Amino acid sequence: MAAAGSEQLRLWQEAAALAGAVCGALGPRGGRALLLRPTGEAVPTRDGRRLLEALSVEPPAARVMVARACSLRATTGDGAKSFVVLLAAVLRGLRAAGGGGAGLRRALRDFEAQVLERAAARGLRRYLRPAPPGLLEPLLEPYLAGRLGPGERRRLAQLCAEMCRRCAPAPAARPQVLRLLGRRFAELHAAVPGLPLASSRVLPGIVLRRDFAAYCPADGELRAVLVTESLRPTLTAPGVEFVVDSEGQYQASLSWITKRTEALMKHLRSNNIKLLLSSVKQEEVFIYYAKLYGVSVVECLSSEEMALISEITGVSPYARFGDNVDREITETAAVTFCQPLLLVSKRCVHIGFTSVSAFQPHCLILCGPVDGVNEQHAAALQEAFTMLQQLFRTVDQREEWKAEGESQSQASDDCIWPSSATQKQLVIENTCKQVSECQLEALSDERERQILDPDKSDLLVHNQKNHSTPVLVAHNTDTVSACECLHVGKGLGETCCHIVPFKQGESCAGIGQDYSNCFIEAGSVLPVGGYFEILLHYYIQDYAKQCQQSEVSIVSNMVADALLSVPKALYGTAERNGFTKFYLEAINLLRKNQPLPVNSEGLESAYCKYQLVISVLRCVTELLSIDLVIGIRRPLQKIEDRDSEDDS
Amino acid sequence: MSRLEAKKPPLFISEPLARDAVSQSLSVLSGILKSSYGPAGRLKQLHNGVGGCVCTTSQSSALLGHLSVSQPVLRVLTASVRNHVSRFSDCGLFTAILCCGFIENFRSLNVAPFTVIKISRHLLSLCLDHLKSEACGCRVSVDFSSVETLACLVRSILTSKPACMLNKTEVDHLTSLVLRAFIFTVPCHVETNAVLGKCVIIPVKGSRVMDSAVFPGLLIETPEIQLGKPLAVKRTGSNMIRIALFSVSMSGDGFNPEEGTVAVHHGISLEVSELNQLLSVGKQLVKDEVGLVVCQKVMHPSLKQYLKENSVLAVDRAGLSVMEPLGRMTGSQSIASIHSLSPGCYGTLKDLCIQSFASKHFLHLIPEDTVFCSLILCNRSETAWDELKRVCETAEHVLQLTVKEPLALLGGGCTETHLASYIRYKSSSLPASTFKDLDCSQTQYQLVAEGFCRSLESVARSLSHDGEEILTDMVYGHSWFVPSGSPCVSKWSDLVSKCGCGVNDNTEDLSWRFLQGQSGSPVIQGCPKELSPKVADLLTLDCFAAKCSGLQVALETANLILDLSYIIEDQN
């Protein structure tokens, strides 16, 4: 017992140290951290994930906490800092409760099933409202308030909302477009250092950050082709020997190459192609003929830019078919305009494409005094797209599932979706369960391997297939696989490993609780500013009273108190007694059963918040279940694919 | 064996701004910048202590580019100012001094950074709205029908950098050269999209400034040309000179490095074959009545000789930088193949002549109608020439920015003091709803506004370096300088003659006050008055776009720095 006590003390101290480190950046009044990279770059940030990773903590348990916080952030786009603060508070409460044995661990699990679920379903749910479909600013502004300085959030929220609206004029297409925006944001924005933020703007079309190799002004609609190889014929090739018999033959061959290049250019021009987008550098002769024949050329496009253009236009790269230059070129993209764009002092390429999907290509020009600020803004916006995507997810899934109708026959019993998208509220509870199970499965068992992969946009569809019987899968999880999944999920566990002997019946925490989520729909929102925590705190206490098991009620009270740590931290930096005032006002409203005040600050996703609470409880259970840390020599293989867009 | 080195733990510094080291470095930096500001600014000598050249300068781009700042907080500041300078060329010191001032003034307030940032943003928007409104008393619209306002703008820039070592006549001469050069770059026939040309600056160091000159068209340095002989260039039927531009090497060794192998039989020389090809190109050029051949790279001596014999002028090693303007100016397409010549590639020139400066000889290419010109810039010493070149480039850039937005701001500190008095007046008469929106009290707002105004005034104060007193008037809010050591007099109007920008004089009583008042500056009773400046009286003007952007960048950078609650340094 004494050993368990010291263990808990250590856990709490580690969590508290992490919480202390991120606390200064928490909430709308939080400050920024300046990360200094070994290269000398200085990047301001308030992103919890970057902060936690920059701390590069050593103790294995703390690394687990950081990994869990980051994985939550990767799925919901938010909450890494709150995660750590809440985790520290729960661990502190546990220590104060003096428990740590199997009893308390079991009580934690029972609490989730018996109390938390009910509190969410019967208490919290009444206060939820669906996200306003058209208005994005009320959602974006509070989100960005946790990410950016006080002077920047409004302008960026406007830009972000404008970008969403212009890229997806039809609200129905929004989830799909948000996914694309999140994935391809690096190519869909251009950063300009040295200008004030107010100069940022959204432009139609896309901007390629390089100059034309050849620019020939052309009016009106034109065609473009994508090229991935050098289009000038060569004398020799790797492994090919060219034998020169006579000087005349050599000159004739060189002259043939030139003629051939010219013929190809003529051919392109006769197909009305006036723009060539090449991923490789083209020969000088080729550029020369392009200029002569009035074809604009852009070279050295990155593979991401090529992929984006292919995705927008549905065109695949043009291949030179041996010597047959006369073949008709079918893979051409329609271009509405193509012009140089002067981004203050650098000339860039600005192209408007006719899109084949619902995505209307637009590009964001981000201005800020230094590169670091632009980087922070771009990262915040990209995560905002993830957050919005999460919010509109229910609608999204339904459409995808509908599309895959036949193949989903085994699941179709549960998946009878209302045909009209407007009948969102009529979701049958069963289907809700299905959704949440999938998401939880992905969270707890599959780990971040899939979720973190930004390119797997259709992740949930896969999960649905894999886990059409999720409860069964979960129950089969035996000790060994539980251990495995623990390692898989660990991004940081490279030099040490943790062996966790699970007891029977305690195996994966939260198997039975998967149902709890269905009470909070993904699209539901609450006013910001700590109302979620207060509501949950109030109703947990309410339901804890009805609970017979004493240990569960201890845990309930402890979690209820710990929940208050987040609003406390939010109000801590503001005026004195701010929290007490807010707490009393809110509790009074709840007692009288009055609706929450409509506050001007905005809304936040209740779903993400609820995910946060569940993740913290899971993490606590996981940490408490570890009894031995074993150092090993070989580094563990890193299997998962990390959130690549943030790793820069 | 894998090399596993223990990672060093990161360094965690909380509240970086509260540290002494940061505030000391900040005051050193702001001292350096303030002492360099303005026409009377002190020069800084930069050298690395182990020999090499010494740079004497008072320009922000040179200063900040060479200083190695170790404090990460200040690195953000200098990076931001350098970015601003790379965008606008002008107002670098203004931005830097203002930013330092904001940080120093706001940090000393006992108000949370969150609130300071919100309020200062609001103050900035008041400033910008004022600057953009017609009623703004510190801006003038630039009249392009006369040259006077533009000349004033250029002269202000030239005189603001004393390291150029110019006297009055030299300033006047250069002002007219820079203006003429700029006017050359404006196209005569404007279509829908007017594109400005370019002025190429050609260095001639060690000569008198008065020898500087500007020429329409381009000058190409040609060391080989013999001065004595008259230029005999073949002309076409319409008395024009046909020009061919080659971007490909004409040296005869232009084998393309390709993958794979080329096997050559014994007795066959590819070099000879190449040379024959080159000579056949030469024949073609002669046949096409080309008078001038310019090659970016090297030309084979035999080809050169052949062209010379056929009275075709050949210039090689022209370099990449000349190719683009040359192509645009002559309407020619640079040729990238020696295997086929298309007649459409040739361009035309009106005339050719030779110009000599000091010991250098140039071929002067005179086109029919051009947006390109060459500025021969002379100065006595290397370091003064470098400074002068940057100043001339700044002036050209400022003129371009002014064409886009035909406005200018009053210089000499008047814009800063005027804005400060405007903000003082405006912030005392805000409705209560503003404070509610900003979530702050009126006192907090007043405190931040005072810090904001002091920062602006500190820029105006930096213009004085010899202990001159600075006054501001209570009518227009301009700044006035009293020479140091002036006797005590009862009336200020006996001491001051003209305000910093030169618009106002001492004829009417403007109720002057000290700018440096410790007890807080007095608030004028009304909005600072607008006046219609007589252009002839103006002394100094500043670029509108650069100053507006500098003001915003300074505040955004200061806010970013004030918002820092900790620094995490990766020590690996």
Image (cartoon, helix red, strand yellow):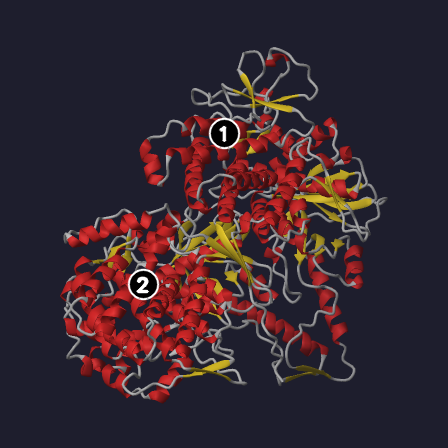
Nearer to me, A561 or A253: A561
Q: Position of residue A79 (x, y in %)?
A: 36, 63
Say which residue label 1 marks. Answer: B420
**Relative to A103, does residue A188 appear above or below in the rendering?**
above
* Point 76% across, 57% down: residue: B307
Say which residue label 2 marks. Answer: A562
* Point 61% across, 55% down: residue: B333
Q: Mark 1 and 2 residues: CB-CB less than 8 Å, in contact?
A: no
Left/right of residue A100 with respect to residue B421 in the rendered view: left
| Mark 1 vs mark 2: in front | 2
Q: Is residue A401 visible?
A: no
Nearer to me, B109 or A515: B109
Tell me if mark 2 has few (under 14), some (14-19) or many (20+) residues whose alpha carbon lies within 10 angstroms of its own.
many
Left/right of residue A134 with respect to residue B28 in the rendered view: left
Q: What is the three-letter code of the residue carrying label 2?
A: Ala
Q: Is residue A184 visible?
A: yes
Left/right of residue A556 with respect to residue B24 in the rendered view: left
Helix, strand or loop at mark 2: helix
**Relative to B377, does residue A410 appear above or below in the rendering?**
below
Kindly identify which chain the residue marked by label 1 belongs to: B
Q: Position of residue A117 (x, y in %)?
A: 21, 70
* Residue sticking out furthest to the front: A2
Quadrant in which the N terminus of chain A is drawn: bottom left
Q: Position of residue B386 (x, y in %)?
A: 72, 43
Q: Quadrant of residue A67?
A: bottom left
Tell me if mark 1 has few (under 14), some (14-19) or many (20+) residues whose alpha carbon lies within 10 angstroms of its own.
many
**Relative to B124, does residue A605 appear above or below in the rendering?**
below
Nearer to me, B479 or A183: B479
Left/right of residue A159 with respect to residue B382 in the rendered view: left
| Discs 1 and 2 carry the same chain letter | no
